[in-house]
Every structure is written in C-alpha cells, then in structure tokens.
Image (cartoon, coloured by chain):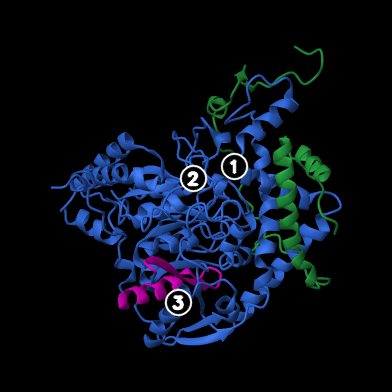
Chain colours: A green, B blue
Amino acid sequence: MPRITRDEVERIAALARLSLAPDEAERMTAQLGALLDYVALLGELDTRDIEPTSHPVPIATPLREDRAGTPLAPELALANAPESEGGAFRVPPIIEGGE
Amino acid sequence: MTPADRSTPEPLGSLAELGAALAARRIGSRELVDAALARASALEPVLHAFVGLRAERARAEAAESDARRARGEARGPLDGIPIVLKDNLVQAGEPTTCCSRILEGFVSPYDASVTRRLRDAGAVVIGRTNLDEFAMGSSTENSARGPSRNPWDPGRTPGGSSGGSAAVVAAGVVPLALGSDTGGSIRQPAACCGVVGLKPTYGRVSRYGLVAFASSLDQIGPFTRTAADCAVALAAIAGHDPHDSTSLPEPVPRYAEALTGDVSGLRLGLPREYFVAEGVEPGVLACVREAAAELERAGAKLVEVSLPHTKYAIATYYLIATAEASSNLARYDGVRYGRRAAHPKDLHDLYHRTRSEGFGAEVKRRILLGTYVLSAGYYDAYYRKAQQVRTLLRRDFERAFEGCDALLTPTAPETAFRLGEKASDPLRMYLSDVYTVSTNLAGIPGLSLPCGLADGLPVGLQLLGRPLDEATLLRIADAFQRRTDHHLRRPPEPR
C-alpha cells in the first residue's frame, strides 16, 4: 500500500474532529507512516477462510427483565456540563440566523 | 533522628498482615489510613504517583470502619484497609481525569462497580493514581500531569499505564491498588516495580465505571505484594454485574482455597517464541528461567509449547486497540462534561478546538490511526485483517492449553527503562508490550509476580491461564512465593 500522505492525515484528522498545527501534521504523517509500515507485517498471513474475532469471549446477548429502574437525575447528568440551560446542554448556534 | 526519619513514616505491610493487625485490634483503620496518607505525602515529591488524595473523606470512612469493628460488625479482610484507584475508575463525588486535560473539572456522578464493591467490603480509598493519558502508554510519560517514578530508581519509569498504582504498592504506601490492563497496563508496571499484578479474564470483573479505551480488551485488576492478597482482592471485585453486559455470569470461585502451596503435577508451558525473541535482556531471561526451575523443583512439569503467531501480536493489537479507541474517544466533544474550548464560533469549531486542545500527542496519534484503519477503503485491509489474525492468536493459546495447565513467560523484555529513553519513538514504546498484548486479544487471564532482580531492578514472571482459571495462576504464584523471598524485597527508602 502506498505511504500515507499529509493530505490523507489531514482528511482523517477532520473526520476525527481534530485540527493539527502544520508541524504536528508533519510529525504525525511520519509517525503514522512508520506504524503503518510496521503493521503491514500482517500481510504475510493468508487469512482467507479465517473468521474475524470481535469479542474475546463467546457470549450471547444477555437479556434482563423489563423492569423500570431509577436513571441518573437530570441535575446530576447536567452537573458536569460546561454550559446548560433549562434542563438541557447548551451549545453554540448550529443554524445560521438562529438565536 | 535524621530529617528523613522524621518525614517518612514506615512502609505499610501486606493486606494479610494489616488485616490480622486490625482483627487483633493491634491497630485501628484510622491509624492505618493516617499512616498511608502520611507516607503518600512524604514520598510524593519522589514518586509523583498521585493525582489526588482524599484525606478527609478517607479519615471519616476509616473512623466508620473502626466503629463497625468495635460493634463486632467488621465486614471481612478488606474492612478498614487503605487502598488507591487508578484515575480512570470513577468514584461518586470525586474527580476523574484519566490524566487528560480534556476531563478537567469532571466530577463523577456515580461509582464504578469495582469502587462500589470495595467500599461495600469496607476498603478506604485514599487517593487516585497517575496513568498515561487514557491508559495509552507503557511508562506514565503520556500523563498530562507528568510521569511517575519508579521507587527502585527514580530516574526510571514505574511502567504504564497503571504506573502510579504499581509504584505506591511497591513503596508500601498501601497494600492494594486497582489498575486497568488493555495490553499489559497492569502486568508491565507490576513487573517494573516488583509487585503482583493480575489482569483477569475478559468479563470476570465488571468494566462499569472504567473509562473506556478499547472495550474488547480492557479489564480491571489488582496490584498487591503477594499472591494471597491478590486472591482476596479478586474475590472482592469479580462477578457478574447487570451494568456491564460483557461481564460473565459464571460464579466466582473461592480463590483463597486454591492456594494450597502444591503445584506437583501441574504442567507449565514455556512458549518457545517468548524465550527467543530479539531484545530480551539476558538478566530478565536468567531470572525467569530460574523461576521455572524453582517451580520444577516444587513438582511442576515444564513443557515447551509454541504460540506461532506471536510476532503478529503487536501489529494486531495496535490496529484493534486504536480502532476501538477512536470510537470510544469520540464522546469527548466539549458538550456534556469536561473541558470546553473558550469562545467557540460554532459547534464545529467547539468540537475541533476542544479536542485539539484537550488531547495529548499520543492520544491524537491513536485516534488518527484508529480513524484511518476504520475508514472507507482501509477497513478490510487493516481492521478486518487484524480481527482475523486475532482469531489465529486465540487459537494459538487454545492449542497450547491442550498440553499444559498454564504458561510461564517473562512479563516484559526488559526491566524498567529510563524516563525519556523511548518517549520520542512510539513504535519502540509499543514493543515494550510484546509479551502482554496477546493475552488481551485472547481474553485470557495473566498474572505478573516478581522473580528476582537484574542489575538491582525487579524482573516480572508472567503466568497465563485458560479463560476463567485465575485460581491456577494464583496457586502457582502463591506456591512460588512460599518457596522464595523475591516478593519480600523492598525498594530502598528514598532519602
């Protein structure tokens, strides 16, 4: 596979909602390139008929009785919010012309 | 009396010793907690192991424990014992930072299930310990609060990511600490600091209230000085929890009863690939081979086994762990808790600036790698491929356990390295985990215990077992500790 480029790193950073300073993007490109070179080792293995493992212990989805419980109180859930208002988390305007 | 004598109280004993002293009323919990707090504060300038102490509440809880005992209502071996928690395990009403700037100001509204269980058993949490940011690292150097130091040599790492927990148990501040292990984060620091560290089977201990890093790999486990103490701690935290759907419904055995001191007839497998790998220090190999010989003299049978896919484990681990981390860490967006960037111009700007300011370099690197391997066009080549190799690694262990009851390996290829030695080379740092990551990928239990010193630094012996067979690992470790005194060696008192 071709080596990861700085443009690709910046595209990925945008997907992950991260902004990289120019020197940071440069450094990450080199480091991710080295890591991807290393993991290319797995290409040696023929895994055509191998089932993937997503969970280490085979367990069925557990079911519980459908009984009402006590959820976290709204004021506790909001206690850590950087900004809240009227029982809700407050964020900057999303739609232009809003507020 | 020298100034050092005045300022540094004596190290605390093991859980068993302190429990016996409490039961015999030779000491009270209040005195023990005071002693632990005093020692914690005295050593903190050297070890830098704590993120925060909770002195007042701990003293109040210790007084409650003493009152229970006076009424004849003591709750068992943990009642009144001072303990610490890694700062990625939440406690109601206390901060949890994961040693990340992004969780600045967060105060947990609830207890982790392990916190709850230990509190119910009467244990007294005296503080929160340092870790690599979000448990991503092998040295604590990725902590936003700076690295912790190894009590055996403050110029060296205590290991990571649970380095603070390992350091305070080794230094005799408390007899029990909890950590978490995603790829070796309990066992490698236990090895570096010369204490016992156990990563239980995936699902043995509830992860509810452990801040998630890689959900298919994370497990919580104890640090103690002896295998017998480890058995007590595991019994207290293991078992099904309705709050964690991946916690296993199997009953919890009486681990203490497994400590018979008898290993005769047990077959211990020595995986060929763990003894010939490049870069293992000769001093480490010598200690581990001598430990195997000691267990053979105790009646165990040594057999050579093979785990043929070992060389693919690190690559597999970093693909899966980073993929899961990129997803888990999406929740830190500056909206519901933790840090929020100042004066965002819109929601997009809020997300970007909060995350870019809040995460450290290693966390960003892993989020980027994880996002990349899950992204369109690369998913099959990287993520799915790694999941397939994970199957091969799991099968390696299944085959090995057909011919033996437990595996015996070094925990880490080297003793504690110098702070700063690997900080600029992520791949070299990742290779510290070569003997520990496969365990998490396969979900099996692993225990590290001290088996000697190489150039004055502790060496870790790793025991790996079948799923849910922690009892056999504890039995072997306890039998070894009955025959040897490596676990009794103390780091030099700091001056």
Between marks 2 and 1 in the image, the one whose residue lies nearer the viewer:
2
Between marks 1 and 3 in the image, the one whose residue lies nearer the viewer:
3
Residue B452 in the image: x percent, y percent?
A: 38, 72
Q: What stretch is highlighted in magenta?
A: B455-484
Residue A18 in the image: x percent, y percent?
A: 72, 36
- Mark 1 secondary-structure assignment: loop
Say if B245 sits above or below B476 in the image.
above
- Does residue B156 belong to the magenta stretch? no
| Disc 2/disc 3 C-alpha distance (Å) | 32 Å
- From the image, tell me which residue sits under label 3: B288
Q: Which amino acid does label 1 sit on?
A: Arg
Q: What residue type is labelled 2?
A: Leu
| Disc 2/disc 1 C-alpha distance (Å) | 28 Å
- From the image, tell me which residue sits under label 1: A67
On what subunit does the disc labeled 3 rest? Answer: B
Residue B50 in the image: x percent, y percent?
A: 40, 43
Q: Residue at x 47, y 46 (%)?
A: B147
- Does residue B465 belong to the magenta stretch? yes
Q: Which residue lies furthest to the left in this view?
A: B1
| Disc 1/disc 3 C-alpha distance (Å) | 53 Å
On what subunit does the disc labeled 2 rest? Answer: B
- From the image, tell me which residue sits under label 2: B89
Say if B480 sits above or below B366 in the image.
below
- Which quarter of the picture shows residue B312? bottom right
Q: Which residue is drawn at 65% across and 62% down?
A: A59
- Mark 3 secondary-structure assignment: helix
The answer to whether residue B203 is visible is: yes
